[in-house]
Amino acid sequence: MAPRRSAIKNQALEVEQFRRRAFIAFAMVVACLIGLGGWYFRMQVVQHRMYSAAAESNQIKPRPIVPGRGLIYDRKGRVLADNIPEFRLDVTPDQVDDMAALVQQLSTRIELKPEDIEAFDRARDASRPHAPVTLKARLTDEEIARFSVDRWQFPGVEIVPYFGRVYPHKDLFTHVIGYVGRVDARDKEKMKSLDAAFSHVGKTGIERYYEDALRGKVGYERIETNVNGRALRTLGVVPAKPGVDLRLSIDLDLQRAMVEAFGNLEGSAVAIDPRTGGILAMVSLPSYDANLFVNGISHEDYAALNENPSRPQFNRVVLGAVAPGSTVKPFIGLAGLDSGLRTPEDKVLSTGMFYIPGVKRGFGDSHRGGHGWTDLRKSIYASVNTYYYKLALDMGMPRFDQYLSKYGFGSPTGIDMYGETGGILPSPQWKGAHIKGASESRWYPGDTVNSGIGQGFWKVTPLQLAQGVAALGNGGLLRRPHLVEAARIGYGGTWGDLPQPEPKRISDNPAHLQVIREGMIGTVHGAGTATNIRAGLTYVIASKTGTAQVVSRRGVAAVDPRRLPMNQRHRALFEAYAPADNPTIAVAVEIEGGGYGADTAAPIARKIMDAWITGKMPGAGKDGKDTLADGRDPMFADAESGAIGSEAFLSPGTIDALEDRSSETQQSEDPGATDDNAQPPADGAEQTP
């Protein structure tokens, strides 16, 4: 076997190969260094501002400054909605790994109710992960102390100072001022990004209508923090703009008097200054404590409100539309004058029953035996249905609606509150659009005569009645009812009046308005339907009573509302302005289950006007009534002794008619001339009212 030969090394080739490899390696190193240098140049020079801002944001954080919500005052400067310093517990979701565990741990130091956790979960779902969400509002001093000791265990959780809303008069102004509540998903959708710092917004009433002005503008401060997020110092501040303070036309004393005048009765009332349109007092009873809703109402309290058959959350003043009954007679009478169909001296014979030509079924008057010959003045103070049955037929519904809409009926008043209903002004068009199976061609003469006494399809709110009667008293100017009369920015700011739209004139003939005024004065001071409140009056009242039917009549017999269950009794109504020659107040009162307007609504209105004009506040007797030593109501003391309400002050036959009310044919003062549940008769058939 031949010996193996060793390969001869080529040193020159190896040297050259090494040089090439070394050059490639060197080139790669140089390229990497150049790339690294370029990267550093890009970061430190080209993107300097971006990374500098990012670094600063890790050290300097903006903290929103939520302004104090504007305060709400009454006309005399007394606080109705206030702010008090509070502390709340906020959680930032993206800084928490296990939210359920965190909430469980916090509950050992802070009392958390199920509704607190539910509200927190809803708010967290509607918010961005980096935005703080309130877990609990209004922490106690003990809760703050317990949490502060173990603060380091809860990253992303902070105690935040803020101004909490409080309503010092509780349920007295709930339906006027409303309340604020926690921000929910719908509120978030409406808010701008800068407004996300607000935890509460107005939900109802004035708080909602003037929300943008009341909450102000958010500011912020730049806070330097350490690596743990603890604040070290403040580097700069952009101040917040405080909310606008509002001054209402409401008078606290009159509001309280209005509630006391109702006693235990349920219903609503509104008082307006006829000279300006400003609301002096406005109540819907029963009411509820607005403070319950500020930080989330408990399940028990909410269930109690919802299950209450009296519906305390329902604002009867702007939503509670009812048939006006005889309270619209002064307006219909004015329409008869302005349209030229009637003169003040034109008379109609009231025999106790009115018949449409060709129809057998009659329409009852307010007295079974009739009122005799009746002119416009008497038709108002004695509430004579026959006068208005015939007037409505003579006018026809197109002209009827033309004038009544001019007086403010059938449309919202424009008050500075959301959700106001416009009621219903009866017309063939409305019936055809809203009554099942009906059409404009199925409007009957019976519908027209019912409309003439405020029954049938009519619906008005107490606010509309107050606006209308104020226009009758101030010379024919229909003013927009309003609650806020002035505003200011900041505590030291100057109050500025809020402009109001120009009033609309309802009649161009002062003589016609004077006739209506004289008829309304006779309601209390003549031989009218409300002489029972005349005792001790030191001023003159122009007024009209009314009763809104709830149940229909049975056959031709009237239904005595005092014999019905409370929920089926007629609604008692009363409208008035005083003093009659130069009114400073106009009032509309509606009592649910009150029976007749003169019996229940008129005495309440008298007490309201007494409080405003004479300063006499209602007493605290039974059902909120003033009482004498022997238990009698002083307002009716003379009437009970025979001095007032006796035959000397009433037209012939009135006493007998009042005693026989329960057996009368139905009418609008004791309504029943309308059967809302009855089906329209076929053409040519007997028609029922």
Image (cartoon, rainbow, N blue to C red):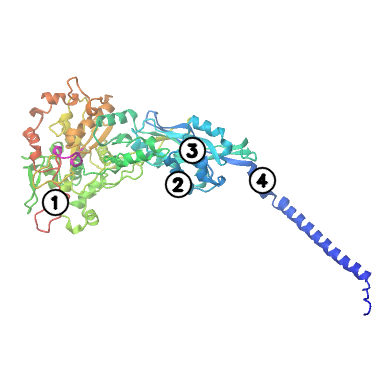
Question: Which residue extends farthest top?
Answer: 629
Q: Mark 3 and mark 2: span between their CA atoms?
A: 18 Å
Q: CA distance from mark 4 to mark 3?
A: 36 Å
Secondary structure under tag 2 reads: helix
* Residue 55 numbered tag: 4
Viewer-nearest of labels 4 and 2? 2
User: Where does residue 146 sit, x and y in percent of width and height?
Assistant: 52, 32
Q: Is residue 397 left or right of residue 173?
A: left
Residue 244 at x, y percent in the picture = 45, 36
Q: Is residue 320 magenta?
A: no
Residue 255 location, x and y as percent?
A: 31, 31
The structure residue drawn at horizontal position 91% and vertical position 67%, both measured from the top left corner, is 15
Mark 1 neighbour density, 10 Å: few (under 14) some (14–19) many (20 or more): many
| Marks 1, 3: nearer the viewer | 3
- Real-space Cα distance between discs 1 and 3? 68 Å
In the image, the segment drawn in magenta is 561-572
Which element is circle 1 on? helix
Pinpoint residue 654: horizontal percent, then vertical percent. Answer: 8, 34
The amino acid type of the residue labelled 1 equals Gly
Tag on residue 107?
A: 3
**Amino acid type of the residue tagged 2 in the rendering:** Arg
* 3D distance between C-alphas at marks 1 and 2: 55 Å
Eye-nearest disc, 4 or 3: 3
Q: Which residue is mark 2?
A: 122
